[in-house]
Amino acid sequence: MSTADVVIIGAGFAGAATAYQLTRRGVRNVLVLEREAVAGVHASGRNAALAFQVLSDSAEARLAVEGARFIADPPEGFTALALLRRTGSLLVADTAGVAQLHRSARAAAALGLGCQVIGVDDAVRRVPALARAPFAAAFWNPYDGVVDIHELLQGYLAAARSAGARIEYRCSVTGMRLEGGRVSALETAHGRVETRCVINAAGAWAGDVSEFAGIGTQTVAPRRRHLFQTVADVPVGRDWPFVWHNDLDVYFRPEGDGLLMSPCDATPHPPREPVVDGAAAQLLAEKIARAFPALATVRVASAWCCLRTFVRDERFVIGRDPDVDGLVWVAALGGHGMTTSPAVGRLGAAAVLGEASAELDYFSPARLRH
């Protein structure tokens, strides 16, 4: 049997960033439990690495901007490598979607980002592969980019470990013990851990953790998304921004000598290792042919998928559970966990320390009981 002041379930971005922020605030006896042999096996290590900031939810967008600033300029000693490559992003839309692009520009201005809506010619100049694409305008954000996701994740874990946190791999959680409605211990593959605080940062398995606490899955619902590394028949500029077609929901960005693409599928999936579905490649081909005709002949070189996790209102879940004392949620980040991780970790740590804020009220798991 071991003890810890705080036990974090999951060493992905949610758990790692929260461990980092807790140890920065002086909490030393932190234990991170990761079911896999290494961190980042699932969504935290399989995403497209897009630092995308102007999110549809304004509160989440503020977290993304805070996160991107941290990633662009991390504290001294956090990493020896640059974490963010600011390529920018282009969101393109047909005539009916131009109004939404202008709303994004106004939202960006409110976030302190100098973005703009540009015309077709300007967009094609930046990304020649947009020639013949069906769009009327584009939203240009020069502050977005591509992140070294593995270096960022390891930066959190290394800093937390150097400040006293422990990380145990190949250690799955099998149960939770409560005494008088309060967390008292976790049962794990390595034995029992006595603790008064558990952070549910289990990603697609967050619903399983809440089941251990006896409160049901709380509407946690993973969704599978595919990514495809492709070979293009047209010249690819490695400095291109990532491009997202807002109307058709498909995107690409340069990766190596080709393009990384996704059809933005969001298929409900149980919390287990997802496998690639051949139908997703067909969906990608259909969307690319419609959205980016110049890229219709790309060939798939490899494919993988991961689980993005949501709750019913698709808002992040961060904060103290209203029914189980000592259970803190840092979950359901819906594919935005990497960019928002510095801010999400800050909020997770604040919740553990009993702080109150409008941000925590907004993301509180209490809303899931209604």
Image (spheres, rainbow, N blue to C red):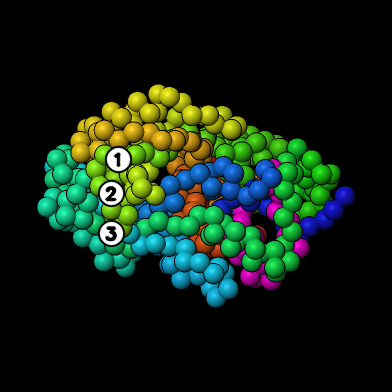
Residue 232: mark:
1
Residue located at (44% from left, 51% from top): 49
Q: Position of residue 305 (x, y in %)?
A: 48, 36
Q: Which residue matches tag 2?
A: 236
Secondary element under disc 1, as helix, strand or loop, is: loop
At label 3, the amino acid type is: Asn
Secondary element under disc 2, as helix, strand or loop, is: loop
Query: Magenta segment: does it hold 31?
Result: yes
Cα distance between the residues tagged 1 and 2: 7 Å
Q: Are marks 1 and 2 in contact (CB under 8 Å)?
A: yes
List the single residue furthest toward the bottom: 76
Q: Position of residue 271 (x, y in %)?
A: 59, 33
Q: Are marks 1 and 3 in contact (CB under 8 Å)?
A: no
Residue 141: mark:
3
Is residue 311 at all visible to an observer of this figure? no
The earlier-in-sequence mark between 2 and 3 is: 3
Span of residues in magenta? 15-35
